[in-house]
Image: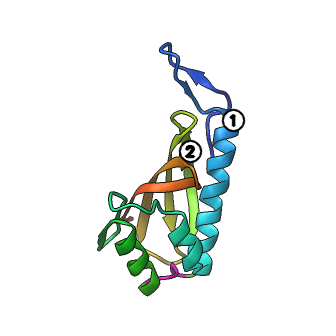
Amino acid sequence: MTVGLHASVEDGTGAVLDRPEVLAQVQSAFERYERALVEGDVAVLTELFWQDPRCVRYGVADRQQGAAQIAAWRRVHPVVPAGRQLRETVVVAVDDRTAVVSTVFGYPGSAVEGRQTQTWARLPEGWRIIAAHVSEVPVG
């Protein structure tokens, strides 16, 4: 489902992008998030967002600032439409504690293309989304 670079990349400054073990951890967390999104598992969706007032989620027609607003919104909107399909998913592990996941999504018969970007951080409690953005554009 997800794609990262096939090998670590050193940028000359000592930073190493896409360590395989980090990519695997973030891919696993992202796949868990996607399962919860399709299944309407509000507990997991809430768990995977950073529990902090600085966490943001910009949706297609909505905006939440802070974990409490995100959790409240998710309780009212627990699932996505049936048939959600991801493509062109890219995971970039910036370092061993930060990653960005970008994907395109769609639904059968839909005339829009969805785009989703999440910034993930490894916190003491595990990998968490600290910022998310979702948008849709007409296709065709």
| Residue 73 in sight here | yes
Check the picture and name the quadrant holding the N terminus. Answer: bottom right
Q: Residues within 10 Å of mark 2 (few under 14, many from 20)?
A: many
* Tag count: 2
Q: Within the magenta stretch, is there residue 16?
A: no
x 44%, y 59%: residue = 116
x 35%, y 68%: residue = 59
Which stretch is magenta? 77-81
Q: Is residue 55 left or right of residue 120?
A: left
Q: Which residue lies furthest to the bottom in this view?
A: 76
Q: In which quadrant of the rendered view does residue 7 lie? A: top right
Q: Within the magenta stretch, is there residue 80?
A: yes
Q: In which quadrant of the rendered view does residue 71 lie? A: bottom left
Q: What element carries label 2?
A: strand
Check the picture and name the quadrant holding the C terminus. Answer: bottom left
Q: Which label is found at residue 20?
A: 1
Q: How crowded is mark 1: few (under 14 residues within 10 Å), some or many (20 or more)?
A: some
Residue 100 drawn at (x, y percent): 49, 45
Q: Which label is found at residue 101?
A: none
